[in-house]
Image (cartoon, grey):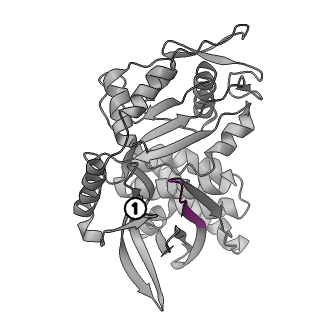
Amino acid sequence: MINKRLLIKNLLAHNDENSFYDKKRKVDISSKEGKAKFLKHICALSNSNPKNNSYIVIGVDDEDNKIIGVDFFDDSKIQNLINAYLTNPPIVQYENIPFPHLPDDSVVGLVTIRPNEAITALRKNIWKYYGGSVFFRDGSISMPKVFDIEIKDVNSKIVSAIENHAQNNIQLTLDGVFDFMNKRQDYNPQYMVFKEYFVLCWSGQKKKVKDENFYSRVDIELINEQVRLFYSALDEVAIFYNDDSFKIIEYVRLGLQQSFKYYKLEEKTIHFDNNAHYTINANLIFEPPRFDKKMLHHVYNTNNSILEKLEKGTPIANHELTDLENLATNYLLCYLNDFEDALPKLEHAKPYIKKYSTKLYKSYKETIRILRKVKYN
């Protein structure tokens, strides 16, 4: 089993960007431009490596290889994006890899592109790239090319050597467990062993509601691979496990005018097999709350008024602070209740919310995470 943190270190230490490896400071698939560039790199790396894995490391400074991290990204439906836009799409996996020096909510993103011997091409137009385009890696650059020659397998031995040097061992596993237990000691850290092979650590602040246990600030890591499987600073989570699986049900707190409820968002189950493999199944179980249209019009107009103040730099009145705190979630609720213009308003608000306060921006990012899951489905 590959230790993904060690794999990233090996990739950064021994290789410049090349035909099987790319690095990015960040990736933004919320915009058409960002989505198009991401698909271009997937296409190029897949075509350039028909016999071996290719990798994209996200959260690294291009100039000095400094690990700066990115936000935790839940990729449960990213394969849908790949399948929708690429012909002969490769199997792509996005994983969140924690590093000890990064803040709790930051990780390094690792995109693994599995071997695919068929030629991958864009299925349809996106941004400035035309449907039918075929990309290959030319050194460290993804370039459109006409495919008329057989691709030589020049990377398999190199990639195999890198992956072999990143194999997990007992010391790495034990170090990972101790690191997690020490770092999360304020949040009831625990570890569990599945199938006598997989070591999973998790932590969270426990809260009992009637006869049920819920957790916030939940962090779940598969220590064998140094992969963070789940992280949420705000949401409530219910946890269930047995000898074969570990299941979480994620809840989100939504509401209007000081009346809030918890709604089930997603059920995620990690299944552990006897053959040293595991699978993750994610199922969206979210039923958007419905509200009175008259009330929503009032909320929507209030949001627009506050957004206008943020744009102009006008001070926010004390009685508007609560509405400001709920700005992102209120736009989300309006969008889920068929206010189509609420979505571009929410996206437009990002730089102003980020500038206003760190706490408000964290709430905004959680809202976008919910929106991304709903849109993927």
The residue at the point 53 percent across, 67 percent down is 245
Residue 197, by quadrant, is bottom left
The reply to whether the magenta stretch includes residue 270 is yes
Left or right of residue 40, residue 231 in this image:
left
The residue at the point 70 percent across, 55 percent down is 377
Which residue occupies the foreground of this view, 327 or 51?
51
The reply to whether the magenta stretch includes residue 64 is no
Q: Say which residue label 1 marks.
A: 200
Q: Is residue 367 depicted above or below 130 in this figure? A: below
Left or right of residue 8, residue 256 in this image:
right
In this view of the protein, can residue 206 be seen by the observer?
yes
Q: Position of residue 108 (x, y in %)?
A: 39, 41
Left or right of residue 280, residue 160 in this image:
left
- Element class at badge 1: strand
Residue 371, by quadrant, is bottom right
Residues rendered magenta in the picture: 266-276
Under mark 1, the amino acid is: Leu
Q: Is residue 300 depicted above or below 353 in this figure? A: below
Q: Position of residue 155 (x, y in %)?
A: 50, 19
Please identify the dominant SS of the magenta region.
strand
